[in-house]
């Protein structure tokens, strides 16, 4: 029997609520499929840990996490207790230290779920967000603080190596799907970083003649996600643009409660991290009404990544059937609680 060591970081707000449900589904799927088991180690990091220790995660969190097969994160952040940039900093360090440069965020309109868009066009895209550099590196400073001439500098970093590897990953992903790749930049207004993206796409296209490519600026892409979402297959974007676009892609498939995310180290030198796209949702935390599906789909992505593909597919199909049957939490207009929604999913495994 294979055993996988999984680190859990349930976090804050609805993070622990949805993590518990994802674990229930993972265990049930492992039992159904057989042949493997997941061993979870849960870490009490986040806002409460901060109140007690003055830090969001243990000082040696990177060393603690390194030996695990994979990590699962609920969500972190509690703006009333800690400024968000403090809570989120260790998370960005995890992504960068473990070189989780490919953030993969599928957005699929499930049968029976209503998109807020008026059209019924099928939506089935994956946004690949560059996750290791770009606009989110810690590079800049505040100067003349508090004076009228105060200024802040925050500089993005786009490396050839970083762009090449995320484009390669995206091309290869497109090949496993509908062979269409759309790259999002703002190279008309930012002529250094994003023009480098444009040039590298041009250079690489020849290696993937079977993949159709196009380029869109972020503003046009925002419109097109709404106007003709069915056009998109694999979308690749820089860190910031991928972040923004994946709230939009989640929105058009029915909301944050349905959108999973994988932060992958494709070379598998380090553990990868799986999570829902959503945050800690303080507005609904503690009520037992959070939609667990985003976390459950994130858990399925984790199984797929560690090699338990049959179980992963089983969970995806169970979610699809559950939604088709009409099971709904309040964010989707229904009345099921978080755990009832999970019960329905487990029944469909
Ligand atoms: P959010 O994603 O937590 O919530 C946005 C809206 O979507 C809220 O109305 C919320 O109720 C709803 N929502 C989110 N997940 C849901 C679910 N599973 N079921 C039903 N409704 C759901 O984003 P927000 O409010 O901007 O941020 C809250 C906190 O989360 C902040 O501290 C933020 O920094 C943090 N955050 C953390 C992330 C992470 O841990 N990876 C990602 C995004 C935000
Ligand atoms: Mg985001």
Image: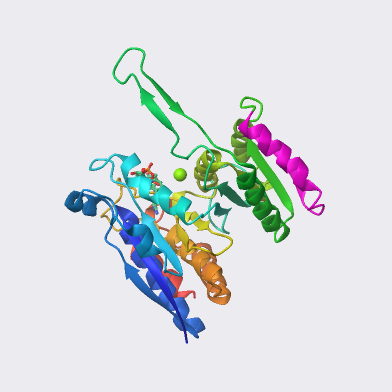
From this viewpoint, is residue 336 visible? no
Between residue 190 and residue 15, name the one nearer to us.
190
**Please, is residue 250 above or below residue 348 in the view?**
above
Q: Residue at x 37, y 26 (%)?
A: 142
Seen at 65% across and 42% down, the residue is 160
Please give the range of residues in magenta. Answer: 192-217
Report whether 221 appears left or right of 77.
Answer: right
Measuring from the top left, give residue 256's x and y in whole percent: 45, 49
Q: In this view, does 204 lie above or below 111?
A: above
**Residue 194 lies in the magenta stretch:** yes
Asked whether residue 6 is in view, the answer is yes
Q: Is residue 56 left or right of residue 314?
A: left
* Residue 107, percent from left and from top: 56, 52
Task: Classify residue 1 as left or right of residue 104.
Answer: left
Q: Nearer the viewer, residue 197 or 106?
A: 197
Residue occupying image coordinates x 50% and y 49%:
254
How far from the left and from the top, in percent, is residue 209?
82, 52
157 vs 44, left or right, is right
Q: Nearer the viewer, residue 226 or 3?
A: 3
User: Would residue 160 be counted in the magenta stretch?
Assistant: no
Quadrant of the picture in which ligand 2 is shown: top left
Q: Does residue 178 sit above or below 156 in this rendering?
A: below
């Amino acid at each position: 029997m294979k055993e996988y060591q999984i680190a859990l970081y349930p976090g804050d707000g609805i993070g622990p609520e949805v993590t518990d449900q994802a674990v229930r589904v993972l265990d049930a799927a492992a039992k159904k499929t057989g042949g493997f088991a997941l061993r979870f180690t849960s870490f009490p990091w986040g806002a409460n840990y901060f109140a007690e220790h003055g830090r969001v995660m243990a000082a040696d969190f990177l060393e603690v996490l390194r030996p695990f097969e994979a990590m699962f994160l609920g969500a972190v952040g509690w703006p009333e207790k800690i400024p968000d940039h403090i809570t989120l900093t260790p998370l960005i360090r995890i992504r960068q230290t473990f070189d989780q440069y490919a953030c993969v965020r599928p957005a699929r309109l499930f049968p029976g779920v209503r998109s807020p868009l008026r059209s019924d066009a099928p939506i089935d895209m994956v946004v690949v967000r560059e996750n290791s550099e770009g606009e989110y590196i810690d590079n800049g400073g505040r100067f003349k603080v508090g004076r009228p001439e105060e200024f802040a500098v925050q500089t993005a970093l786009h490396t050839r190596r970083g762009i090449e590897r995320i484009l390669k990953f995206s091309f290869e992903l497109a090949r496993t799907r509908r062979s269409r790749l759309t790259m999002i930049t703002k190279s008309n207004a930012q002529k250094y970083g994003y023009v480098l993206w444009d040039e590298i796409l041009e250079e690489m296209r020849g290696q993937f003649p079977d993949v159709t490519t196009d380029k869109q600026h972020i503003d046009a892409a925002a419109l097109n996600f709404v106007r003709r979402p069915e056009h998109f297959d694999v979308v690749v974007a820089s860190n910031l643009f991928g972040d923004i676009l994946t709230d939009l892609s989640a929105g058009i498939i029915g909301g944050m409660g349905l959108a999973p995310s994988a932060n992958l180290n494709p070379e598998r030198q380090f553990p990868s991290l799986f999570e829902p796209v959503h945050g800690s949702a303080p507005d609904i935390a503690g009520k037992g009404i959070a939609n667990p599906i985003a976390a459950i789909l994130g858990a399925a992505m984790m199984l797929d990544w560690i090699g338990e593909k049959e179980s992963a597919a089983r969970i995806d199909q169970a979610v699809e059937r559950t939604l088709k049957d009409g099971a709904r939490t309040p964010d989707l207009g229904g009345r099921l609680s978080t755990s009832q929604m999970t019960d329905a999913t487990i029944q469909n495994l």
